[in-house]
Image (cartoon, coloured by chain):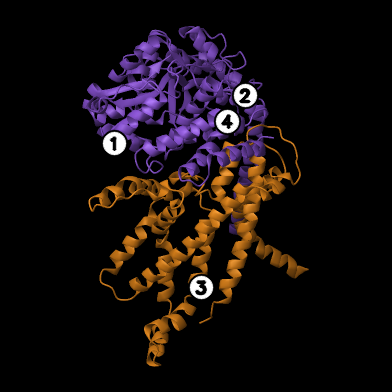
Amino acid sequence: MENLIRTARNEMWYLLFMLPGICLFVMAVIIPLIMGARYSFTNWDGVSNSFGNVGFDNYVAAFHDPDFWGALWHTFKYALILTVLVNVLSLLLALVLDSFLPLRNLFRTIFFLPSVISIVLAGFVWSYNYSTGIPNLLSHFGIDASSPLGNPDTALFGLILIALWQGVGSPMIIYIAGLQGIPGELSESARIDGAGSWKTFLHVTLPLLAPSVTINLLLVLTGSLKVFDLVFVTTGGGPGFATDVMSTYIYRTSFSSFKGGYGMALSMMFFLILVIVTIVQMSISRRREVEM
Amino acid sequence: MKKLMSLGLCIALFSFLLAACGSNNGSSSGNSAGSANASGNTNASGNASASEDTSGKPVTIKFMHFKSDFTDQINQIVEQFEKENPNIKVEVQPVKYDDYYTLLKTKLAGGDIIDVFTLNAGFNTQLFADGGYLMDLTGQPFLNNFDENVVKGQATDGKNYIMPLNANPIAVFYNKKIFRDLGIEVPRTWDAMIAAAEKIKAAGKTPFALGWKDGWTLTMWDTRDLPSNTALVAGQPDFFDKIETGQAKFADNPAVKTTLDHALKLFELGNKDQLGVDYNGAVDLFAKGDVGMMYMGTWPLPDIEKKNPDLYNNDLGYFPYPFSNDESLNKLDFNADASLAIGSNTKHKEAALKFLEFMSSKEGGDAWVQNIKSLSYVKGTSTDIAPALKDLQPYFDNAQTYDSQLFLAKTTIDWRAQFDQNLQNLFFKKTTEDKMIADMDAWVSKNHK
């Protein structure tokens, strides 16, 4: 008993210091989540003060909503392609910039620079580039180009390109840090054993880099699944719904179509999907990590 | 002792934090109470500060508007107002039109106070009036500064919640030089306009400048072509009222097909990359002088004047948009835009009314006309805003104007975004006209049971 009180007294300090954080978390995350869950069972229009309960109607409706499935498909297409591209490219850049290269600090800065500006600004800059800058430039070489964002077939790839340009910086830094944590003796001994640089990379560097891969995959994947700002400022989900991702669809249903309750139900479903994707992804890539 | 003090400090900090949590919760419930009695429009604090106004204390009112293209110009008008009313400061918040109504809705629903804001007559006003967010302006003396018909036309359920101010002809700008060189007459019918466009295309120039990357530019066109054809050609003036109540379907309205055909024609005869170029890009193209026509309100006038004064002064023409092949129907489309409303929860009622009073005076109206380069409903204000506007004078003189937006005003269903996106699919042959019409009906029935 005496012991318990002593531990409680000792631990209380930690608890006390955690309380502000917990308080914030509860206010900013937990309470809105619970309120949102409650609204998702209503036919609230998002503006008025009165609404009625409709049970699971919103969730059932979502399952029969082709726009929902379309948006979900676009979201995953965008996120998966982007995750692969960002990781491959940033790993390549990291490998190049980690090995000997003249002016490598300059190049690191250059590749990292786009990550510094806000994604909204990047969206504006690139919609101008796509529609005016690049076509003007190419017209000097006699090539007739038009903005990929203006065509439903290419709009999503146009967005992925912007996100790639903007998102490659921070994973690159994480990879460089990971590479620098790998002792040089290991690859050296592999080389003495007769492994070429490709084999060394595959069997020594990559497994030891696995924690960085895990964290980068997680960050890029969850970040790109939740994409909103880029899509909203550059295409707004168009043309022809070709870039309509979950978050813009939820936004449109909740605010433009005045279906706050339905929008909340969609958000809840999307939240669950995100949780599942994260858990699956974590468990897969954790298994591939090796201890040094 | 030291330990005791730090413990005390911690407790103080902690209770402060809890208090912060608590007060936040309190204010959020206060918010809902605030919006609940917004319709009632009598809360104690509102009354208290309303009486403060009269005592001559300086007050600040917030003015939110969607004329973000004219941020500086509006600030100049506001400065003029402030000079005459030294006790009232106006905090101007310009918002881009595409985001404006979302922001306004969120702010009002969240209990934020905006004293004066711009609204479009019609369904938007209806929505906010129904929600109890607008102050009733019926019978205010400054409404006498407008034509009685205009005031009546903008009333909602017989009451005036908004004060008309800006009026815009929506028509087609054309390059007189191109028309002259190719021997083209100003078209008075749809077919004549398309024939002219094809002639321009054959001469190696772009017939239409389209900036359909921005949502509103495409919307502006189809929310005029469709209701005009529906009401005046297909003879269904109450089509959109019926859509609201589920009595009509897009499939029953032959004008929908007409509009889709028109859209495809325009897309075909427009500049390349129509959905990748935004409004500014289209105005740029037109101002360079290689484009024959551009469907638009008067907004780009200052821009064109700046970019190509020669075109602006000598070769810029303006003709009513010929939505049909019946010349007698193709009048000038003349819509209200950016009318002013006062929030029902304002704490500075008198200051807000003063502001509206100023904007409805001849002086305020003239300031609007000069700065915004747009027409004003205020009686007796100047119409001399640009050489191109002289082309429209006969239509004003002979009262050959109509308001396409009145046909739309009764529906609160926002079919526009859905329609636009489907239309874009149609442009790229990802859907057919019949399928698109069926999709629209399915969307309306799904979303508005």
Task: Say which chain is purple.
Answer: B
Q: How far from the left and from the top, in percent, is residue A79?
A: 51, 59
Who comes first in sequence, dot 1 or dot 2? 1
Helix, strand or loop at label 2? It is helix
Q: Residues within 10 Å of mark 1 (few under 14, many from 20)?
A: few
Query: Pointer 4 and pointer 3: residues touching (CB < 8 Å)?
Result: no
Amino acid type at circle 2 is: Asp
Give the farthest residue toward the bottom: A193
Residue A122 horizontal/vertical position (percent):
39, 50
Q: Chain of mark 2?
A: B
Q: Which residue is mark 1?
A: B202
**Mark 2 to mark 3: distance in Å?**
61 Å
Identify the amino acid type marked 3: Pro
List the residue tagged with mark 4. Answer: B108
- Secondary structure beneath label 4: helix
Tell if the residue under mark 4 belongs to the same chain as the one under mark 2.
yes
Q: Are marks 2 and 3 in contact (CB under 8 Å)?
A: no
Could you tell me which residue is drawn at 56 percent across and 40 percent down?
B436
Tell me the CA gap for discs 1 and 2: 43 Å
Q: Colour of chain A?
A: orange
Which residue corresponds to mark 3?
A211
| Residue displayed at 39% across by 47% down | A121
Based on the displayed image, in which of its 4 quarters is residue B203 positioned?
top left
